[in-house]
Amino acid sequence: MTDTARIVLSRPLRQAFDYRIPDGQTVMPGQRVRVRFGRQQLVGLVIATGVTPPEGLSLRPLGPPLEDWAALPDDTRELMSWAARYYQHPLGECLFMALPPALRRGQPASLPTETGWRARPDADPDTLPPQARKQKMLLSWLKQQPDITRESTIRAEGFSLAQIRGLHQRGLIDTATPKPPTPDQAYLDSLPQLTPAQQAAYRHLPSPGAFTTTLLYGITGSGKTELYLHYLQEHLGADQQALILVPEINLTPQTVRRFRRYFGERIQVWHSALNDTERLRTWLSIRRGDPAIVIGTRSAVTLPYADIGAIVVDEEHDSSFKQGEGFRYSGRDLAVVRGQMNDCPVILGSATPSTESFHNARTGKYRLARLEERVGDARPPKMTLLDIRSRPLEGGLARPTLQAIGERIERGEQVLVFVNRRGYAPVMMCFDCGHMMDCPHCDARLTYHRRDRALRCHHCDYQRAAPTTCPECDSEAFRPVGQGTERTEDILEAQFPETPVIRIDRDSTRRRGRIDQLLATVNDGTPCILVGTQMLAKGHDFPNVSLVVAVNADGGLFSVDFRAPETLIQTLLQVSGRAGRHRIPGRVLIQTCHSDHPLLQQLCEADYPDIVDHLLSEREALGLPPFRAMAILRAESRDMADSLAFLDHARQMAARDGLAIWGPLPAIIARRADRHRAQLVLVDERRSRLQRTLAQLCGTLDQSDKPAGLRWQIDVDPIETG
């Protein structure tokens, strides 16, 4: 056995490096170490010891370990190594992604004792001034807590450090040392009793202690979350850990509140909006084996769980589970692999499961549990297509739509208007010369944002002030064209001046906790009109929403992306599911210029599994996923000719029997941030053969000469093919 360690770095390098272990020093796989790399001092991760280095090389000595224990345990390293092979990504970057940012930079794997807070017994929220609304909410919330509350828990509820300090300075709350969560912690509330339909679905959920994957198909409003809660309470051991994956940060706070009612401080949170200290605290807690239930976005699957007893992926169809840049992994698929490696059950839940998951259930790879009744007296909403051809529109809304909105508001109900485009209008155009404002760095139009009179590119974040006259002909007939959330908000405010209009999109919810503030009126049941993008399409429970309007529903009907029809139907069904979830019957109006389209007709007449069967039959006939495996080789450079020439060379190297290759072709948005993008699509009936081809191709491309500035990457199981 040699005194050699093999390490990887957080660099886009598809190789590991050998270092000599100094006499008297002991290291183990998974440890962080300091290494000399070129002229730099870097943090490395040990992946093996006792390796035989190449002959004739003089190895540099390994630097000191940063802790005397393995930062990444064996099963987490195994998971990330599998992901590196499957997604054809450098191992070092994959392994380092499983560390919190502080540890990637070499900071100590330790934290000072966390601060806890409790309200003073005599503290009265009504003594606070009216402008201290958030402090009043925080104090009221703290007075309801049965014990000392951790600062991280308070922050996870959407409150800020400034609000905590403000209450402390006023003498209304005190600091205290929080108690660590105990394995036998009692549940705070009793779980709601399951309905007969929920009980029938619950019996199909997996048994604990062994790996199996179950697809829970439950229509919107059927109570899938109650099944998750019952499953964890009944089957999760007192000292075990569990993972609940949610697709977006904005769904995390409401999910956390709901789970914390029943599991208290055992609930921990993981998402990108946490600061480095918060993420390190959660990571250390999971690493030392605290009995936690983690609610997080896709990267939570990479945490170093000590004894994971169950994994739940909510809204499993959502494209947010697929990383869009760099290491392009799927959090949902990695969760299934993690369940297999850790021998624990996996539950994939959705009202609109992906075609891949339904196909896996139909072929026996997954089990299937069905929940097709809404809770209580609620019924699925009635869906109606409103053909807007030749109809006069006011800001994109037809007169029958405005009339339907007015009727619901007069009855004291709430309305949700879905506009899948933020900003005021997608383009500014001169009505005299036809000039339109383009992004100078992308092949895309600039979107007009009226609130700050700015033109912004939603692809590269370029922005400029909006001119008042046409830059080409100086005409004053230079106006916004098309529909965005801001414009819809303005039209509805003008039509219904006495009714609050609340806009929910990425622009209005940038600040932490802002979405909770905006939704406070909705959750109170006050008559209002919600205007929003896909952020409102999933996960929210609005009891008083009785009407949902989909403004521009035709976008996915004629896209070049073969997944677009599936995504369109999923989005429409998800947003429709916000209506009629409780006692008030729901209605859905879908404005369209193609009311005779078979897919939209089927949406109103049939159930979702029938639509999936139709989509799957089309995919099988065309030889598309899930019937064949797919990967995309993408290249971008300062010149389109360089990108296409590189991909053409890659096509020649990859060509072999059984492999279909499409392209190379420019991407739909061929220029983005002054980078010219093209792609090569590879499709094979045998996934293993495609993986071998990709591995060989990556090795060859790494060694080949490339034009200066050219970047390339592989996207395995792509979500977007344009």
Image: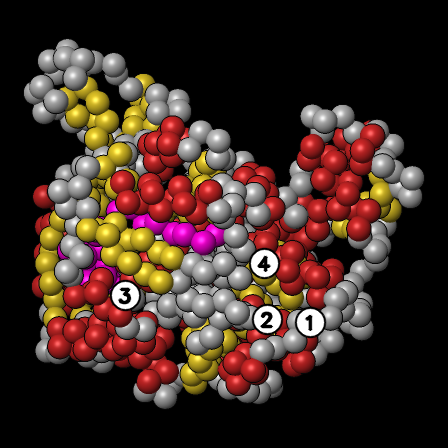
- 373 left or right of 126 in image: left
Look at mark 4 in the image and give the residue it sits on: 255
Disc number for residue 191: 1
Q: Quadrant of residue 680?
A: bottom left
Query: Could you tell me how far apart the alpha carbons at marks 2 and 3 are, in whole angstroms?
Result: 28 Å
Which circle's residue, 4 or 2, is located before the other in the chain?
2
Query: Could you tell me how far apart the alpha carbons at marks 3 and 1 are, in whole angstroms?
Result: 35 Å
Pointers 2 and 3 in contact (C-beta within 8 Å): no
Front of the two marks 2 and 3: 3
Q: Is residue 298 visible?
A: no
Q: Which residues are magenta?
A: 545-567
Q: Amino acid at mark 3?
A: Cys
User: Crowding at label 4, few (<14), some or many (≥20) Cα neighbours within 10 Å?
Assistant: some
Residue occupying the point 25% across, 16% down = 467
Look at mark 3 in the image and give the residue it sits on: 604
Which sits in the foreground, 295 or 672? 295
Front of the two marks 3 and 1: 3
User: Crowding at label 1, few (<14), some or many (≥20) Cα neighbours within 10 Å?
Assistant: few
